[in-house]
Amino acid sequence: MAEDILNLTDEDGVFLVRLARETIENFVRVGRIGSPPTDVSPRLREKGGGFVTINKLARGSKYLRGCIGYPLPYFPLVEATMKAAVEATRDPRFPPLRVEELDGVVVEVTVLSVPELLKVKDPKEYPEKIKVGRDGLLVARGPFRGLLLPQVPVEWNWDAETFLCECCMKAGLPPDAWLDKSTEVHVFRGVIFEEEEPRGKIVRKELSVERE
């Protein structure tokens, strides 16, 4: 699996999260999107997939407020981050993000490796090929697509089979669609950076990985 795009420094991660936060605030406040910065490290000028997640903090817990991104490397990372940040503010699953919410949300950026088709002789082998905490999933069948980031099964305490079922449902397919040989399962990995509090310290998010 090609993972060169994941070799980001902590400084790169801090830059991307701050860029996402600035883009979100500018768009929500004044409806404007600035031009992508050019004075950045070569790594951030490479094309790469990326997602921006907005989480609402309430009563000591996080609640998803928006998550949009690009699974494939269509744009340089800085541009992909800005585009995803804007779209995350108007995730169709939620009302558009409002100005008064900005002080109560934290921003997370996930940079993705290119999804690769997981090849098996029998679909029943998929769960043993997938490692929760390491892999993200992209399920595809015809026009149906569903993607879940690596952090999602960790946050929900899913095993690999549940992860597959949930990703199928995200695609609009039956939960057991992964058992059908016409369903493709792609895996990818990610590096995650997040704010600890609104506009606060930005850290690399380490996931708990299943043991071999």
Image (cartoon, rainbow, N blue to C red):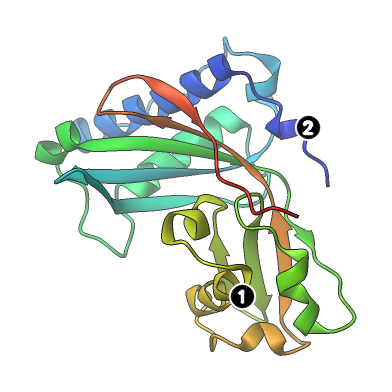
Horizontal and vertical percent for residue 196?
A: 33, 28
Label 1 crowd bin: few (<14), some (14–19), many (20+), radius 10 Å: some
Of 57 and 157, nearer the camera is: 157
Residue at image point 15% right, 44% down: 98
At numbered mark 2, what does the secondary structure look like: helix, strand or loop? helix
Residue 128 in which image quadrant: bottom right
Direction from residue 24 to residue 49 in the image, left or right:
right
Image disc number at residue 161? 1
Quadrant of the rendering where the C terminus is positioned: bottom right
First in residue order: circle 1 vs circle 2: 2
Nearer mark to the viewer, of 1 and 2: 1
Residue 13: percent from the left, percent from the top?
53, 24
Is residue 42 left or right of 171 when viewed as pictured?
right
Q: Which mark is residue 4?
A: 2
Q: Quick one: SS at disc 1? A: helix
Q: Is residue 71 above or below residue 138?
A: above
Question: Would residue 185 be seen by someone viewing this image from the given angle?
Answer: yes
Residue type at mark 2? Asp
Rate crowding at label 2 as few (under 14), some (14 to 19) or many (20 or more) other CA atoms within 10 Å: few
In the rendered structure, which amino acid carries the disc numbered 1?
Glu
Q: Alpha-carbon distance for marks 1 and 2? A: 28 Å
Residue 186 falls left or right of residue 108? right
- Work out whether 59 lies above or below 100: below
Q: Which mark is residue 184?
A: none
- Give the residue at the far left of this rendering: 100
> Is there a contact, CB below 8 Å, between mark 1 and mark 2?
no
Q: Is residue 9 above or below residue 79?
A: above
Name the residue rendered at 21%, 47% in the picture.
97
